[in-house]
Amino acid sequence: MPGQGIVVVVSGPSGVGKSTLCNTIVAQVPQTMLSVSCTTRSPRPGERDGVEYCFVDPARFQAMVNDEAFVEWAEVYDHRYGTPKRPLVEAVNRGVNVLLDIDTQGAGQIMERFAGAVLVFVTPPSLDALKQRLDRRALDGPDAIRRRLRRAGEEIARFEDYHYLIRNEHLPQAAKELESILLAERARISRVNVDELVDSGLLEPSTMKEIVT
Ligand code: ADP
Ligand code: 5GP
């Protein structure tokens, strides 16, 4: 039986590089996946239903809230975003680590439901760099970018609610830090699968004696 997978929340201002970082980690660390949120916002050019998000209308979203189908949900930029419960719980029970790219409101809700969740906050090197990334990404109009920048300060102010902080200046370095966090968390004593240790005889002093003599 594998141990439980780790729930890793990745938050930070829009455009800081969360989805870029999460996708890099999913490609590099086996048994790791990205949670696909539901949202009431419209798809941006290039976004596919069921891949970046599941795009649902407000009535469907509300029905899912009523059915308790989300482990957490929040309103961000006038739209609702939620993490579907079933795929998350099933993956974690199969020993798969799940990355959640969600906002600071959602992070608090996850912490209440998954005591072992790891919370990572990503900051840009500066607000100018953040603006440049939003401009270069060119997926939001000027008004939406201004709104995202205004909200960035409020999001960054919540960094102390998190366990780790990554400054995403140089992407490969930031990705290495996120991967290192995941690998180190996997080795935490509180997550060790005791059955595996017992089965391997490592907790049995008599086995040790037989081998040594
Ligand atoms: P988020 O998911 O946080 O909204 P994205 O992952 O979409 O942000 O990244 C926003 C833009 O910034 C993308 O065009 C991405 O390629 C770019 N980006 C990400 N990390 C860096 C970095 N370290 N340096 C420069 N550009 C970056
Ligand atoms: P975007 O519209 O740029 O994709 O995302 C806007 C914000 O919503 C980002 O801060 C992102 O992390 C957050 N977000 C995306 N999915 C979820 C979710 O399921 N729950 C919560 N609470 N926030 C989400």
Image (cartoon, helix red, strand yellow):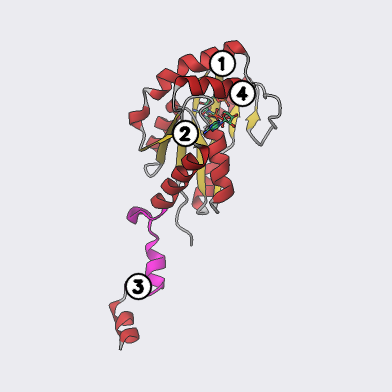
Crowding at dot 2, Cα within 10 Å, few <14 / some 14-19 / many 20+, comes out as many
Crowding at dot 3, Cα within 10 Å, few <14 / some 14-19 / many 20+, comes out as few
To which residue does mark 1 refer?
145
Residue 81 percent location from the top left of the image: 55, 26
**From mark 4 to mark 2, how far is it between C-alphas?**
16 Å
Question: Is label 4 within 8 A of ligand 1 (CB to nearest ligand atom)?
Answer: yes
Q: Amino acid at mark 3?
A: Leu
Q: Residue at x 52, y 51 (%)?
A: 96
Q: Amino acid at mark 4?
A: Arg
| Region of the chain picked out in magenta, as a range | 186-203
**From mark 4 to mark 1, how far is it between C-alphas?**
11 Å
> Is residue 174 shown to the viewer in this render?
yes
Q: Is residue 202 magenta?
A: yes
Q: Amino acid at mark 1?
A: Ile
Secondary structure of residue under mark 3: loop
Give whichever of 88, 122 is nearer the camera: 122
To which residue does mark 3 refer?
202
> Is residue 69 shown to the viewer in this render?
no
**From mark 4 to mark 3, how far is it between C-alphas?**
54 Å
Sequence order check: which comes first, mark 4 or mark 1? Answer: 4
Crowding at dot 4, Cα within 10 Å, few <14 / some 14-19 / many 20+, comes out as few
Where 139 falls versus 50 (above or below)? above
To which residue does mark 2 refer?
168
Sequence order check: which comes first, mark 3 or mark 1? Answer: 1
Q: Amino acid at mark 2?
A: Asn
Sequence order check: which comes first, mark 4 or mark 3? Answer: 4
**From mark 3 to mark 1, how far is it between C-alphas?**
56 Å
To which residue does mark 4 refer?
136
Give whichever of 191, 180 is nearer the camera: 180
Q: Residue at x 46, y 43 (%)?
A: 178
Secondary structure of residue under mark 4: helix
Q: Is residue 190 magenta?
A: yes
